[in-house]
Image (cartoon, rainbow, N blue to C red):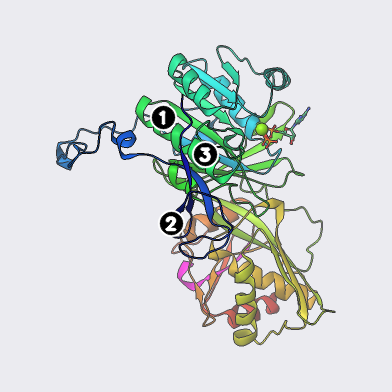
Amino acid sequence: MAKAKTQYACTECGGTSSKWAGQCPACAQWNTLVESVVESAANRFGVQAKGLVQGAPVMRLSDIEAEDVPRFGTGIDEFDRVLGGGLVPGGVVLIGGDPGIGKSTLLLQALANLSRVKSALYVSGEESGAQIALRARRLGIDAGDLHLQAEIQLEKIIGTLTEQKPQVAVVDSIQTLFSDALTSAPGSVAQVRECAAQLTRFAKQSGVTIILVGHVTKEGALAGPRVLEHIVDTVLYFEGDTHSSFRLVRAFKNRFGAVNELGVFAMTDKGLKGVSNPSALFLSQHDAQVPGSCVMVTQEGTRPLLVEIQALVDASHVPNARRLSVGLEQNRLAMLLAVLHRHAGVAAFDQDVFINAVGGVKITEPAADLAVLLAIQSSMRSKPLPRGLVTFGEVGLAGEIRPAPRGQERLREAAKLGFSMALVPKANLPKQKIEGLQVIGVERIDEAMTKVREFS
Ligand SMILES: Nc1ncnc2c1ncn2[C@@H]1O[C@H](COP(=O)(O)OP(=O)(O)OP(=O)(O)O)[C@@H](O)[C@H]1O
Ligand SMILES: [Mg+2]
């Protein structure tokens, strides 16, 4: 087969060039030229492009028959939950996560379950068959009818998929694949994009469900082009501290279900086990209350989760005081400190401020604001917050405290876990009394700070 012609296209302006250059000749941006396959019009339409080309038929939307998406479970409840109820035929799922977090383990477990009812194929570009067999043995997996291929060339993989006609296939990982059509190395932006696009096209045409494993960069984003996330139907991320045994799988995008569902797993020597009642997982155990620690209730999808937010405020010895956050948004911390100063009169400009969400969870919702500020204030005063206190609420730039969605559910979960006091936005005050929980509503940040000082 003749080698496909390639060209270099600019990721910024779309300009093309036949040779690679450091600077795009069209828009003068640096380092934006990426190799891609030239698709001739004849190639794209399968006909000589003469005049008008016949496209797909135009239909009335109401005439198109569509049933509910048929789903099939993976046999791992927590995994099905993040997937929005299970896998969808022809759907493409991308799973990203830090090295060694358990991507291959989870997929091997899921595929082994699936292989009992469906035909399944595991394509590995990273590990040999023997390595995977060893893992399966260690995990005590009954691999049943699971087929395996160790291959990294895209065309051969698609060939196998066409021939074997599996119903589900895992490709581990997309960064190891390479297509013959491109000359760039596996893992390069062009290769990753091309391989993902081809596999997606194949999945849509054939109805095979494909699960792709993706590497993440140091910043935690999926390595390779950002378009990768647009190409696939579902994007899942593995989160969690590799040093602790808990792992979270979070849906980042899902064309077939709600996002923000969370799957919680524990890594054991028998692989990943689902944790069905995870709400108290991220509380660290202190014998006595410590300063700088505040428990918040965050709502992940349909389940509330209690997370401990820790803050450390220390005199700064550098001209620009440091603001560091782990698991929470860095920019938001600077903003919150400004609100704290302006509206509650607590200054931290000469202090280093560190905040951390315990257990490697990432909290993206603004309802963490109040907990962050309470923890900061507690650390500054070296006074612990009252025992059994739990909080949530968004803090606005005007110093107001805004309600968080599903306040009642959060409060009920906190009460269930034995918390006795809750400091929440006034609009989240429950209509009926919650057994064992004293709920205090606040409207402004200074009011919240005063209330807490009264109790500790
Ligand atoms: N013998 C063992 N006993 C218990 N846990 C183990 C054992 N061997 C490996 N593990 C766990 O399995 C994890 C590796 O999982 P896995 O290979 O699925 O990760 P991965 O996300 O696929 O990594 P990579 O990105 O390198 O492919 C290790 O981090 C470790 O926690
Ligand atoms: Mg792996």
Indicate which label's residue lies in the foreground, 1 or 2: 2
Q: CA distance from mark 1 to mark 2?
A: 30 Å
**Residues tagged 1 and 2 counted as in contact (Cβ below 8 A):** no
Mark before the other along the chain sequence, 3 or 2: 2
Segment tinted magenta in the rendering: 420-428
Foreground pick, 52 / 63? 52
Whether residue 435 is visible to the viewer of this picture, yes or no, is no
Density class for disc 3 (Cα within 10 Å; few <14, some 14-19, many ≥20) is many
Say if 4 sits above or below 128 in the image: below
Q: Which residue is mark 1?
A: 203
Q: Residue at x 43, y 56 (%)?
A: 15
Q: Quadrant of the C terminus?
A: bottom right
**Nearer mark to the viewer, of 3 and 2:** 2
- The residue carrying mark 3 is 94
The answer to whether residue 213 is above or below residue 23 is above
* Residue 341, image x, y percentages: 65, 85
Q: Amino acid at mark 3?
A: Leu
Q: Determine whether 59 is above or below 205 in the image.
A: below
Between disc 3 and disc 1, the foreground one is: 1
Instruction: Tell me residue 78's x, y (percent).
Output: 55, 36
Of the two numbered discs 3 and 1 on the same chain, state the one appearing first in sequence. Answer: 3
Q: Quadrant of ligand 1?
A: top right
Residue at coordinates 31% horizontally, 39% vertically from top-left?
41
Q: Which sits in the foreground, 111 or 398?
A: 111
Q: Is residue 194 magenta?
A: no
In the visual, does 54 lie left or right of 155? left
Q: Disc 2, ligand 1: is the CB inside 8 Å?
A: no
Q: Find numbered disc 2 in the image and state the secondary structure of the residue it sits on.
A: loop
